[in-house]
Amino acid sequence: MTTTTTNGSSGADRRGAVWLVLAAALTIAVVLGPAAVAGWATGTHLSVAALPEAVASGFAAWVRSGRASSAPLADAVAFWAVFHAVKAVVAIALLVVLVPVGRRLWGAYARARSGGRRALLLLVGVLGAPVAPVVLLMTMANVQGAVAPLSSVLTFLPMDGPAVGAVRSALAGGVSTPPVATLVDDFRVYHAALVVTAVAAIVVVAALTVVVWVRRTRTPEPARRLRRVLAAAGVLLPGLLLFLGIVLVANLSTVADTAPALAAFFDGSGT
């Protein structure tokens, strides 16, 4: 019996180590991978550091052309679309991996016999608790950027110069030039993408909240620490739901009335 228990514990430890290593690898990949893949896949040889200059020159040429097509920004937009797509995929993978990591961490805390081990696991758990929500928001933002890379890459645009002034004046005067019309349409898609991802996230988090409370009701009374962990999660998750609801409402209002939000963006008071 002792040998079987020891082997089972060793196997669980090895699986836990694999999940931790995978989480660490994905964390590194989400930081370093997107720019490298985007530069290679698009053949633009751009980098994130080079985007402000590329976007500024491309935007100026586009506005001067007076055309609806944002072709002068094509390289920057293509680079940024791939960047966001890669980052979104890796972030989703990281989010999936964080689930078993979190379960194992809090399970170990609930089973820990020594006070020192419990305190250490509690500290790690509390410090690590914001990681999954942050990765969730990162995923949403990168899906948004992949769907509407033109609006996303304009965050690198220096808000000065004649081209920006021309767009700002057109928006203030209600004048819809071809470039301005394209900008408004893309900005609407940009925020609609966040509406869709916010709805999806709300559904997932709401379902997770229900699962947590059901799990708590089925956990035996003697397992007090595990019940406390589940209760804490069940209380905190609705806070994330509230935040996601605010994000949803704010972006719905932008989708419904896009031009003023775009004007605020070019005035430097909105995104």
Image (cartoon, grey):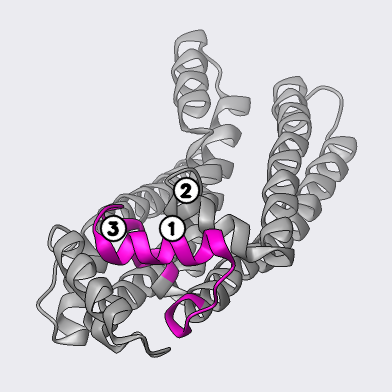
Q: CA distance from mark 3 to mark 1?
A: 27 Å
Decide which of 172, 254 is in the foreground and name it.
172
Q: Quadrant of residue 216?
A: top right
In the rendered image, residue 153 lying in the magenta stretch gets the answer yes
Check disc 3 and give the amino acid type.
Phe
The residue that mark 2 highlights is: 12
Q: CA distance from mark 1 to mark 2?
A: 20 Å
SS for callout 2: helix
Above/below status of 131 relative to 100 = above
Instruction: Say few, some or many: other residues with alpha carbon within 10 Å of mark 1 (under 14 / 14 to 19 / 20 or more).
Output: many
Q: Quadrant of residue 44?
A: bottom left
Q: Nearer the viewer, mark 3 or mark 1?
A: 3
Q: Nearer the viewer, mark 1 or mark 2?
A: 1
SS for callout 1: helix
- Lower sequence index among marks 3 and 1: 1
Give me the disc on residue 155.
none
Asked whether the residues under the numbered discs 3 and 1 touch, taking CB atoms below 8 Å apart as contact, a structural biologist would say: no
Q: Position of residue 123 (x, y in %)?
A: 47, 19
Above/below status of 137 relative to 107 = below
Check disc 1 and give the amino acid type.
Leu
Asked whether the residues under the numbered discs 1 and 2 touch, taking CB atoms below 8 Å apart as contact, a structural biologist would say: no
The residue under the point 59% across, 56% down is 261
Give me the disc on residue 156.
3
Instruction: Say few, some or many: other residues with alpha carbon within 10 Å of mark 2 (under 14 / 14 to 19 / 20 or more).
Output: few
Q: Nearer the viewer, mark 3 or mark 2?
A: 3
Extreme residue in the top direction? 115
| 29 left or right, relative to 97 | left
Give me the disc on residue 94.
1
The residue under the point 54% across, 32% down is 108
